[in-house]
Every structure is written in C-alpha cells, then in structure tokens.
C-alpha cells in the first residue's frame, strides 16, 4: 500500500512552524508496512488544498491530511476534502455536544464558530479528540482512504496511537517495513561508504544506505515483507556491516553517544570529570542530559580564561605563555588537573579555536586539542574541525566522548 501526506498551513511554508508531524507520521506508516511516496505542504487556500488532495488521491491508496481542522475561516481542510471527494458536509449533533462539553468543563463560554468543527464529509468516521475541540476523521471512498488529523502534535499523536495506527495495521496486515540504524562515529561518510560499498543496495530488499549527520554517519538498513522474515534479513545485513566497521559503530536506532558512554562508565564503576574551554560546557551538558548521569559524572570546570586554567586546574603558567592556551601541553594539563581536582577516575580536557575569529596560519580556526587523563596515562588528540562555530564545538564534544568510549572498550570490566 502507498500513502501521501498533505500538510496544510501557510505558517509551515513561511517557516514559522516546523513540520514535525510529517516525520512522526512517516515512521508510523513505515511500522505499518505502508510506503510513503510523498509529503507536500500547501497554503491555507481552498483551491490549493483541493488540488493537492486530488493529485495525492490519484497516486496513493491512503492520504493523510494534517492541519486545517480548526474553527476559524482559514481552517479549510474539511471543506477541501468534501470538494475533492464530492461528499457533502453533514452536521453531527453528537460532535457538537462534545465540543460544547469541552468548553463547559473549562468554565468558558463557547464561541459559536466552534460548531464548524461538528461538520464531517458524508460517510466519514469521526476520531475523538481528547485534548482539543477538532475531531479528526477517516473517509473511505471506493478503494481510497483519506485520514484527516488536526495540526497540534498534542492532539494528533493520541489520535494516531489510539485509532489511526490500529486502523492502518488492519488495512495492511501481511507486510511490514522495518528499519535498523547503525550509528558510526570517528569516520567520515566517504570512508564508511567505501568500507561497505559492496553491501549497499539503496533500492534492494533489504537496502543499506548511509546518511551523514554532524560528526556521525548513520547506516540505515530497511527491509519489507512478513515480520519474521524481515527481522532475519535485517540481522544478516547488520552482522556483515559490524564485521567491517567493528568498534566504529557506537550504537543503534535512538541511542546517543553520551548515553552509550554513560552506560559503559556505569558498567565499569568509573567516574568522569571534564575541563572545557572552547566548548563552554557543551560536553557537560550532553553528559548530564542523560537520566542517572550522577552515577558516573562528578562535575566539570569551564576554564575559558587562562587564569582559570592556571589557578583552578593547575596548568603551568610558563606553558601557557610558551605554547599558548590552544596546545597539546595545555590540553593534557587541563585533563590531568580536573581529574585530580574533582577526584575522578577519568578526566577530559578540551581547548581550541571555535571561530569565526582568532585563527592564525599556525593555529587555524577549528584547531582543537582534546586530552583524556586516565589512571595509567594521558592521551591527546589534535583535530582541525571544519564548519562554523557551533559545528566545531559539537565535533569537539563528540570526539571527546568517542575518546572516552574507545578507551573504555580497550579497558573492559575486570
């Protein structure tokens, strides 16, 4: 089965609102084994919505509309569906009473314009809205189906989980589409692609395709068919990819690098402290956004000024003058200093030039030294990261986490 999504709203075209609903619905359709052919966005104009609907219905078995079900004059989706299908709008007293009850519970007088939401195309099945006043609906006509959903995610998601997804699963019970994402860090997209070139088949079943992310490469394995067969297909491809890339793969699906590193620290009973200069606390933020990170993260120092590096972390003043704040010598002493200061098992030190100014021919923008102090040794890595200030900062935090991860791999739990 094939589907299309039509998002309605001028604010989406203007960029004032980000369309997160389409991404969510794409995942739901995939889980239901339904191929998403196209996503389109149209302005709040009746003729534009009608045309988009007619085009989508001509191509797809299922069309999902998002938005335009409110009570105001620019909410035109139900009218457009009525016009596109030829099913007249019918007033539903039971829906009108639900809308009135919604306002009564809040102790607010209902504007009469809200009763516009009690109209549905003839033959449509209403989807109850537990949060707002706009009901969604499902309209089947001949071999096609139109599913209309409100725009606010807080209203759309419960409708999808409780009604739409079970409906779609029933419509397409035999086939599923399953994806598995393998996440790679420390290697560029071209290197990764070259390593798995013979395994890639973007249009095959199963398929394997790389996607570049900031300081990561995601390898997406996709397979369709009966559930038991699809799982085996995914596992076979994943095994081959892991044989090629080994520890460059840090996680799967929704796993994040900071969460993976945290679990490794917790498993080994080790603690971590960080000293940050150019990242300004980004590394500490990423580590502490993981629930339970207090099990292994003790704290950090944002040592932006040289005086803080010297007076708090114990960096040698002569080394600061001789080598500069952005140097291997200083990064090493930052890592060792914060490890000693906070009494952690591991210490990370980051110092660099995030830009856009401050670079020289000898020390260009993007130059970052990252050190890891351990009970046995201190290692340091020199990096020159491309990109703007935020990308350099992100890549720095990513590389620091990966240095910790790779050290932990080499030092398994005793």
Image (cartoon, rainbow, N blue to C red):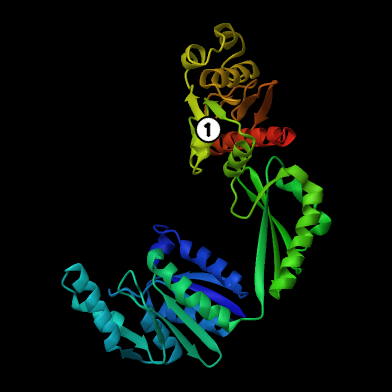
| Residue at point 52%, 68% (across, down) | 25
- SS at mark 1 in the image: strand
Q: Whole-percent x and y of residue 413?
A: 70, 35
Quadrant into which the N terminus falls: bottom right
Q: Residue furthest right?
A: 198
| Residue at point 52%, 36% (across, down) | 295
Q: Quadrant of residue 199?
A: bottom right
| Residue at point 64%, 15% (across, down) | 329
Q: Whole-percent x and y of residue 11?
A: 38, 63
Which residue is identified by label 1?
A: 297
- Above or below residue 82? Residue 19 is above
- Above or below residue 262? Residue 225 is below
Q: Quadrant of residue 320?
A: top right
- Above or below residue 107? Residue 90 is below
Query: Which one is nearer the viewer's eye here, 135 or 213?
Result: 135
Instruction: Give the left or right position of residue 193, taking residue 351 as reference.
Output: right
| Residue at point 47%, 16% (across, down) | 308
């Amino acid at each position: 089965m094939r589907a299309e999504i039509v998002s309605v709203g001028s604010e989406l075209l203007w960029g004032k609102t980000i369309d997160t609903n389409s991404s969510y619905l794409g995942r739901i359709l995939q889980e239901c084994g339904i191929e998403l052919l196209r996503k389109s966005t149209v302005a709040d104009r009746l003729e534009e919505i009608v045309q988009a609907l007619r085009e989508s219905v001509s191509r797809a078995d299922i069309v999902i509309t998002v938005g335009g079900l409110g009570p105001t004059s620019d909410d035109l989706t139900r009218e457009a569906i009525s016009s596109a299908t030829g099913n007249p709008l019918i007033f539903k007293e039971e829906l009108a009473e639900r809308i009135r009850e919604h306002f009564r519970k809040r102790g607010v007088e209902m504007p009469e314009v809200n009763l516009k939401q009690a109209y549905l195309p003839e033959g449509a099945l209403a989807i109850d809205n537990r949060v707002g006043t706009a009901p969604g609906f499902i309209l089947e006509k001949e071999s096609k189906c139109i599913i209309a959903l409100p725009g606010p995610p807080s209203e759309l998601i419960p409708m999808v989980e409780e009604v739409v997804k079970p409906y779609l699963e029933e419509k397409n019970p035999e086939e599923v589409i399953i994806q598995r994402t393998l996440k790679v860090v420390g290697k560029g997209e071209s290197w990764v692609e070259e390593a798995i070139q013979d395994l890639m088949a973007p249009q095959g079943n199963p398929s394997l395709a790389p996607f570049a992310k900031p300081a990561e490469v995601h390898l997406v394995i996709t397979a369709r068919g009966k559930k038991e067969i699809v799982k085996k297909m995914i596992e076979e491809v994943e095994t081959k990819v892991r044989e090629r890339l080994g520890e460059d793969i840090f996680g799967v699906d929704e796993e994040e690098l900071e969460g993976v590193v945290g679990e490794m620290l917790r498993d080994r009973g080790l603690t971590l402290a960080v000293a940050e200069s150019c990242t300004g606390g980004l590394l500490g933020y990423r580590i502490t956004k993981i629930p339970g990170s207090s099990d292994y993260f003790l704290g950090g120092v944002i040592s932006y000024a040289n005086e803080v590096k010297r007076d708090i972390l114990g960096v040698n003043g002569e080394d600061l003058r001789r080598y500069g704040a952005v140097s291997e010598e200083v990064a090493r002493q930052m890592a060792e200093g914060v490890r000693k200061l906070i009494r952690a098992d591991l210490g990370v030190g980051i110092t660099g030039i995030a830009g856009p100014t401050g670079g020289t021919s000898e020390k260009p923008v993007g130059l970052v030294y990252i050190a890891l102090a351990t009970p046995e040794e201190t290692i340091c890595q020199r990096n020159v990261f491309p990109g703007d200030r935020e990308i350099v900062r992100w890549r720095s935090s990513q590389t620091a986490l990966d240095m910790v991860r790779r050290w932990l791999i080499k030092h398994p739990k005793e």
